[in-house]
Image: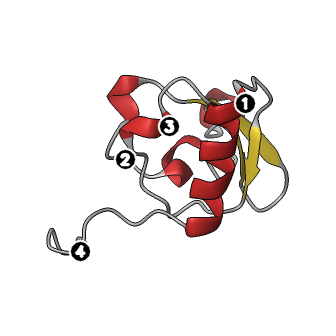
Amino acid sequence: MPRSAKKGPYVSGRLLKKVFKALDSGSQAPIKTRDRDCTIIPDFVGLKFLVHNGRNYLPVFIQTEMVGKKLGMYALTRLFKQHAGDRKS
């Protein structure tokens, strides 16, 4: 079930502080975060994030098409190894 529209998008206060600090300083350094459930807001566009997938941090560059989605959508947690297919012997 989606989050109530009355509440607005969920963004961690800790992450917002990091974003505003990066915007004020004009820093190009990626922002390291474990908050995969945070919604991407328009203030994030053009910033680089390092999103934790449970094992390591994956780089994510935020573009306008990503607004409204979650950070975790772009840092996959499961590694897909191909189906066996013809390799079975």
Q: Amino acid at mark 1?
A: Ser
Question: Which quadrant would residue 54 be assigned to in this image?
Answer: bottom right
Q: Give the residue pinned by disc 1.
A: 25
Instruction: Tell me if 67 is positioned left or right of 14 in this view.
Output: left
Q: Amino acid at mark 4?
A: Lys
Task: Please say if 82 is above or below 26.
Answer: below
Badge 4: residue crowd in 10 Å (few <14, some 14–19, many ≥20): few
Tell which circle, 1 or 3, labels the residue nearer the N-terminal end: 1
Disc number lying in front (1 or 3): 1
Task: Please say if 68 is above or below 61.
Answer: below
Badge 2: residue crowd in 10 Å (few <14, some 14–19, many ≥20): some
Tell which circle, 3 or 4, labels the residue nearer the N-terminal end: 4
Q: CA distance from mark 2 to mark 1?
A: 26 Å
Q: Give the residue pinned by disc 2.
A: 69
Q: Give the residue pinned by disc 3.
A: 44
Residue 7: assigned label: 4
Find out whether the residues at labels 2 and 4 contact each other: C-beta distance under 8 Å. Answer: no
Q: Nearer the viewer, residue 83 or 2?
A: 2
Tell which circle, 1 or 4, labels the residue nearer the N-terminal end: 4
Residue 84: assigned label: none
Residue drawn at (49%, 48%) of the image: 73
Find out whether the residues at labels 3 and 2 contact each other: C-beta distance under 8 Å. Answer: no
Residue 80 visible at all: no
Disc number lying in front (2 or 4): 4
Tell which circle, 2 or 4, labels the residue nearer the N-terminal end: 4
Find out whether the residues at labels 1 and 3 contact each other: C-beta distance under 8 Å. Answer: no
Q: CA distance from mark 2 to mark 4?
A: 16 Å
Residue drawn at (49%, 60%) of the image: 38
Task: Please say if 73 is above or below 3.
Answer: above
What percent of the width, then of the height, locates residue 64?
A: 37, 25
Disc number lying in front (1 or 4): 1
Tell which circle, 3 or 2, labels the residue nearer the N-terminal end: 3
